[in-house]
Image (spheres, coloured by chain):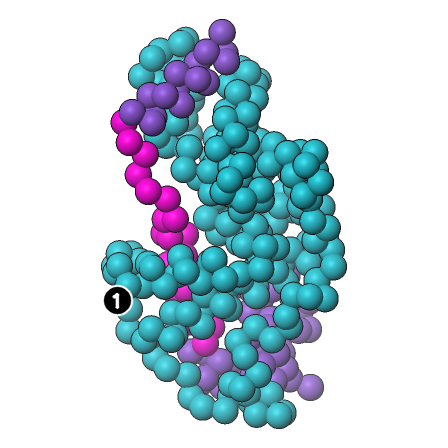
């Protein structure tokens, strides 16, 4: 937080290097959110607009959320406005098309017990596992296979640290729907890791 | 009635987020006490949650790109 305050004051003072530090630290995360909402073709424009809004509002940043969460909210709202303006905003309330079984019915007996014992993961530390190129690639590819709704919720929550309640405000969905989408995304990633063990 | 193993996998995020009702939480924990497979599932599910925030989908920005973007936002402020 102290680092954030210092960075903000340097940006507000117009310090050249501070702008670069700000971009270096947060730009990729913002691009990830914009891509998830509007697609990669429009993401650059959306992030640029979001940066302009953020810089103009930076004086009023009160530090109630982290700078990362604040910037994520700005870029997500900018992306939503962009999608609506171009009639590409999809209503996410209808989850009927979002498949129900998370881990796959074939894993369970008809009365809901595990059919086979689960594989034991021996990944070492999560940090080491994430560094494995093969694992990393598998997870990135799995993210691409998530439904649009699942990917948006997952990226906002897991990768950008946004609370479910804030996600609901941005995506205009109920908390229970957000949690269902998040859980389904998580289980797909679980299955992807397991497939690699 | 206790949740089935399949129900346990559907409820795990709610359980970890503390969103289950107290009675369902109790049933969830009772099932965990009795089922080694669901204990393993939950432990590995938590491990996955620690692993995924480290996914980076982006390539590193080049110095040139950073300067260009920084320049644009600096201009916007003026």
Which chain is cyan in the rendering? A
- Residue A53: horizontal and vertical position, in percent? 56, 22
Q: What stretch is highlighted in magenta?
A: B41-63
Q: Residue at x 25, y 60 (%)?
A: A132
Q: Which secondary structure is most common in the magenta stretch?
A: helix
Residue closer to the observer: A12 or A44: A44
Q: How crowded is mark 1: few (under 14 residues within 10 Å), some or many (20 or more)?
A: few
Q: Mark 1 points at which residue?
A: A124
Q: Is residue A41 visible?
A: yes
The chain that hosts pointer 1 is A
Which chain is purple in the rendering? B
Q: Which residue is drawn at 64% across and 72% down?
A: A100
On screen, residue A143 above or below A123: above
Q: Residue at x 33, y 58 (%)?
A: A136
- Tell whether B75 sits left or right of B3: left
Residue closer to the observer: A130 or A139: A139
- Please give the count of numbered marks on the rendered protein: 1
- Residue B41: horizontal and vertical position, in percent? 45, 76
- Residue A72: horizontal and vertical position, in percent? 53, 36
Kindly indicate the quadrant of the structure image that contains residue A162: top right
- Tell whether A32 sits left or right of B67: right
Residue closer to the observer: A74 or B65: B65
Q: Which residue is drawn at 34% across and 79% down?
A: A120
On screen, residue B49 above or below A27: below
On screen, residue A191 above or below A22: below
Residue A80: in magenta span: no
In the picture, which quadrant includes the C terminus of chain A?
A: bottom left
Q: What element carries label 1?
A: loop
In the picture, which quadrant includes the N terminus of chain A?
A: top left
């Amino acid at each position: 937080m102290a680092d954030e305050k210092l960075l903000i004051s340097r940006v507000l003072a117009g310090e050249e290097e501070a702008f670069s530090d700000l971009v270096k630290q947060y730009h990729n995360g913002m691009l990830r959110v914009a891509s998830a909402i509007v697609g990669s073709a429009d993401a650059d424009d959306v992030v640029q607009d979001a940066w302009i809004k953020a810089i103009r509002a930076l004086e009023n940043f009160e530090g109630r959320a982290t700078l990362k969460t604040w910037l994520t909210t700005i870029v997500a709202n900018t992306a939503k406005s962009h999608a609506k303006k171009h009639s590409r905003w999809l209503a996410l309330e209808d989850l009927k098309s979002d498949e129900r079984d998370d881990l796959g019915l074939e894993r369970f007996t008809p009365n809901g017990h595990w059919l086979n014992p689960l594989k034991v993961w021996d990944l070492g530390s999560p940090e080491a596992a994430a560094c494995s190129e093969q694992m990393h690639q598998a997870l990135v590819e799995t993210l691409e296979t998530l439904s649009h709704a699942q990917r948006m919720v997952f990226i906002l929550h897991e990768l950008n640290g946004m609370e479910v309640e804030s996600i609901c405000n941005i995506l205009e969905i109920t908390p229970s729907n957000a949690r269902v989408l998040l859980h389904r995304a998580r289980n797909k990633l679980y299955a992807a890791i397991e497939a690699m063990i | 009635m206790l949740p089935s193993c399949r129900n346990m996998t559907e409820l795990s995020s709610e359980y970890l987020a503390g969103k289950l009702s107290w009675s369902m939480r109790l049933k969830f924990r009772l099932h965990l006490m009795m089922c080694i497979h669901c204990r393993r599932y939950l432990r590995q599910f938590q491990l996955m949650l620690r692993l995924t925030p480290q996914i980076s989908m982006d390539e590193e920005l080049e110095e040139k790109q950073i300067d260009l973007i920084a320049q644009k936002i600096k201009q916007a402020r003026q």
